[in-house]
Image (tube, rainbow, N blue to C red):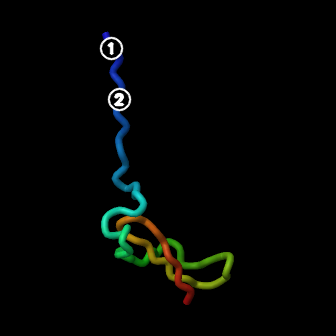
């Protein structure tokens, strides 16, 4: 008989880079509240994260 190989289950939480409208520069920015302090700069920062592709941008307060 043949060996049966199990399929890998994909994580829906994994974000693929540059998908949909993001590849044309239309990101859906949401404030990411887990990281509010940048240790290297020693300042409070606002971290924006794209809801679709996961790219981050940082704005210092």
Tell me whether the residue at label 1 lies in contact with that at label 2, contact meaning CB atoms closer than 8 angstroms: no
Q: Within 10 angstroms of label 2, few (less than 14), some, or many (20 or more) residues?
A: few
Tell me if residue 46 comes above or below residue 8 in the rendering.
Answer: below
Residue at image location 40% in from the left, 57% down from the top:
16
Indicate the quadrant where residue 52 lies. Answer: bottom left
Tell me if residue 23 comes above or below residue 8 in the rendering.
Answer: below
Quadrant of the image for the C terminus? bottom right
**Residue 43 place in picture, x, y as percent:** 63, 84
Residue at image location 37% in from the left, 49% down from the top:
11
**Residue 5 place in picture, x, y as percent:** 36, 25
According to the picture, the residue beneath numbered tag 2 turns out to be: 6
Tell me how far mark 1 sits from mark 2, CA to CA. Answer: 13 Å
Secondary element at tag 1: loop
Is 59 placed left or right of 28 in the picture? Answer: right
**Residue 12 place in picture, x, y as percent:** 34, 53
Residue at image location 39% in from the left, 64% down from the top:
53
Q: Give whichever of 16, 38 is nearer the camera.
A: 16
Judged from this view, the residue extending furthest toward the front is 24
Judged from this view, the residue extending furthest toward the bottom is 61
According to the picture, the residue beneath numbered tag 1 turns out to be: 2
Q: Within 10 angstroms of label 1, few (less than 14), some, or many (20 or more) residues?
A: few
Secondary element at tag 2: loop
Is 55 placed left or right of 24 in the picture? Answer: right
Residue at image location 40% in from the left, 55% down from the top:
14
Residue 16, label in figure: none
């Amino acid at each position: 008989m043949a060996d049966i190989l199990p399929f890998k289950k994909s994580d829906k939480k994994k974000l693929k880079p540059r998908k949909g409208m993001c590849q044309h520069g239309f990101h859906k920015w949401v404030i990411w509240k887990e990281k509010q302090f940048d240790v290297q700069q020693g300042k409070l920062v606002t971290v924006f994260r794209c809801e679709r592709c996961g790219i981050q941008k940082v704005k210092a307060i």
